[in-house]
Amino acid sequence: SDEILLDVPRGAKGFLLGAFLNDLRRPVLWLHPTSESARKGYSEIESFINDTGYSKELYYYPEPDALPFEKLNNNERVTQERLRVMAGLLMIDGRSQDPDEENNPIPQVPPLVVASVDSIARLTIEPGTFLQRTLVAGSGQDISIIKMSDQLLKIGYENVSIVDQPGKFSRRGGLLDVWSPHSELPTRIEFFS
């Protein structure tokens, strides 16, 4: 079975999940009944795995501010964090985790997602659509800065003068600064003619 259920004393779940994360070799969802409980669980496990180097694989999946079917816009930070979690689950080092793709890389340490029931019950982008709209750039790739800027706009990035948060990019001469929701910091790409 792909499901592992833990019935251990409060406070020990985070410790056990952190200890077994490397051995499980599969993505883990630690589901909580409320968002408050999920935030506490995230803080708990974060304290156990911070020194192990696995903290990049730990994600908190927040629930959107707006209720389902409300015509309110979601908080941009929450949307970016939900996208970062999706990227963490579907991408490893910029490579797709699509099971149908050849040479599918196996992550060194799979992601651990801490979420509330409400956060995972909300609609989100389908994994296939997410992968189709993911742009991967590599060293030596032959692409023009104009084409890459156009692609970034098509997949939802905003062109700004200064890149100060995820989902933004800036183009100046042969430089392109891009901040992916999956990255902690923006990336600078230099184009040569």
Image: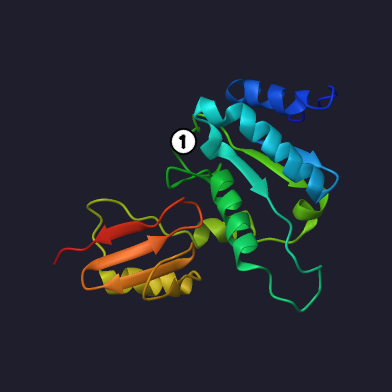
Residue at the image point whose x is 59% and y is 28% from the top: 49
Question: In the image as oriented, which residue stretches furthest toward the left?
Answer: 193
Q: Quadrant of the C terminus?
A: bottom left
Of residues 73 and 87, the one nearer the viewer is 73
State the scheme by which the image is colored: rainbow
Choose between 150 and 169: the one closer to the eye.
Answer: 169
Q: Is residue 185 above or below residue 23?
A: below
Q: Residue at x 72, y 28 (%)?
A: 14
Residue 174 position in % (x across, y down):
21, 69
Q: Nearer the viewer, residue 169 or 43?
A: 43
Percent from the top left, x then y, of residue 20?
65, 21
Report the residue at 21% width, 63% height from top. Answer: 191
Q: Is residue 45 above or below residue 80?
A: above
Residue 85 visible in the picture: yes
Q: Position of residue 94 (x, y in %)?
A: 43, 47
Q: The residue tagged with tag 1: helix, strand or loop?
A: loop
Callout 1 environment at 10 Å: few (<14), some (14 to 19), or many (20+)?
A: some
**Horizontal arrangement in the rendering, residue 174 relative to residue 146 (left or right):** left
> For the view shown, which residue lies furthest in the bottom direction?
71
User: Can you see residue 1?
Assistant: no
> Where the N terminus falls, by quadrant?
top right
Is residue 3 left or right of 96 when viewed as pictured?
right
Instruction: Name the residue carrying label 1.
Output: 105
Tell me if 177 is positioned left or right of 51 in this view.
left
Amino acid carrying mark 1 in the image? Pro
